[in-house]
Image (spheres, rainbow, N blue to C red):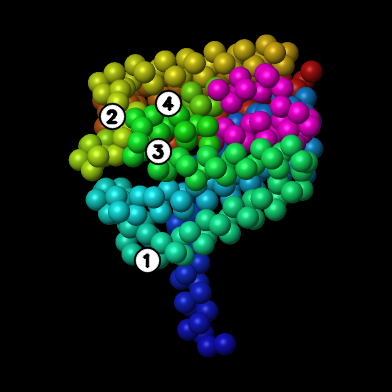
Amino acid sequence: MPVGYFEVISRRMHIYLRLMRADRPIGTYLVAWPMLWALWFAGNGHPDAGLVLIFLAGAFLMRSAGCVINDFADRNIDPHVERTRARPLAAGEISSKEALGLFVVLCLTAFALVLCTNRLTVYLSVGGVALAALYPFMKRYTQWPQVFLGAAFGWAVPMAFAAQSGEVPAASWLIFAANVCWVVAYDTMYAMVDRDDDVKIGVKSTAILFGHWDRHIIGLFQLGFFALMIAAGRVFDASLLYYAGLGVAAGFAIYHQRLIFTRQREACFRAFLNNNLLGGAVFAGLALSYLFT
């Protein structure tokens, strides 16, 4: 084949990877942390290694699929937003048909991984795909799209319990609810970056809904997250190391409040990104809790 053919393929793959945000893995990390919490709780600190690999790959694939369908939904909005106007669909580098095709391929690949688990997990995966496809359109109809994002990101929690233990115990929904609170908090920080643009183009978000109470309400959702994670720790009989991890995570949450205090765009975006460390602190405490008991 001619050299030019491979160059065209390489450029196309680069566009696909940008559309999937493969160069910006923060979303994959934020999907992966609650999934790992769930696997460690469900497996009493010793989850099946194969399941961990399957769920980590699934986190990448479904987050990528979510980015693709989000850009498809926002293809007429992103060109008018400073931060998103260079995205492949907004810039006209890829067609809507290609984007939908990529979304289907990513979802089918993730589903193939789920088929390596059990029937209950397969059934639950249908809900995960539905939430991933539904979320991007919610910002047109509700002021609370972040709640739908939290449900989409957190759906890996019941799936992880189903895959590891064959059931979804009532206590697993404490972790799911905690994740929804966490997502509303950090995605409101993210939405604060685009608030002025979103107001102009009519996009809805919790950052707009909360107005000048944004920092205070984010704080309430942060408190809700920690209260629910403490409750989960009590149900699963976690040791003091788990609560120490939550303490470190709380320190990050306070730092996020300091960052967003002036509502400057760059600082709000830094606060959003720093939530990766918060999620990692919770996991570290949880893993150590089981390791030393």
Q: Which mark is first along the chain, 3 or 1?
A: 1
Q: Main secondary structure of the magenta part?
A: helix
From what the image shows, is residue 255 above or below residue 276?
A: above
Say the numbered circle drawn on residue 93.
1
Q: CA distance from mark 1 to mark 3?
A: 25 Å
**Residue located 52% across and 79% down the image:** 6
Q: CA distance from mark 3 to mark 2?
A: 14 Å
Q: Read off the residue under disc 2.
A: 208
Task: Assign a secondary structure to mark 1.
Answer: loop
Q: Position of residue 50 (x, y in %)?
A: 77, 44
Q: CA distance from mark 4 to mark 1?
A: 33 Å
Whether pointer 1 and pointer 2 mark residues with C-beta atoms closer than 8 Å, the reply is no
In the image, what residue type sits under mark 4? Answer: Ala
Q: Which mark is first along the chain, 2 or 4?
A: 4
Q: Is residue 28 magenta?
A: no
In the image, what residue type sits under mark 2? Answer: Ile
Q: CA distance from mark 4 to mark 2?
A: 13 Å
Q: Read off the residue under disc 4.
A: 185
Q: Which mark is first along the chain, 2 or 3?
A: 3
In the image, what residue type sits under mark 1? Answer: Glu
Task: Assign a secondary structure to mark 2.
Answer: helix
Quadrant in which residue 215 is drawn: top left
Q: CA distance from mark 4 to mark 3?
A: 17 Å
In the image, what residue type sits under mark 3? Answer: Met
Q: Which quadrant, please, contains the N terminus? A: bottom right
Q: Which mark is first along the chain, 2 or 1?
A: 1
* Residue mark closest to the camera, 1 vs 3: 3
Magenta stretch: give its range. 153-177
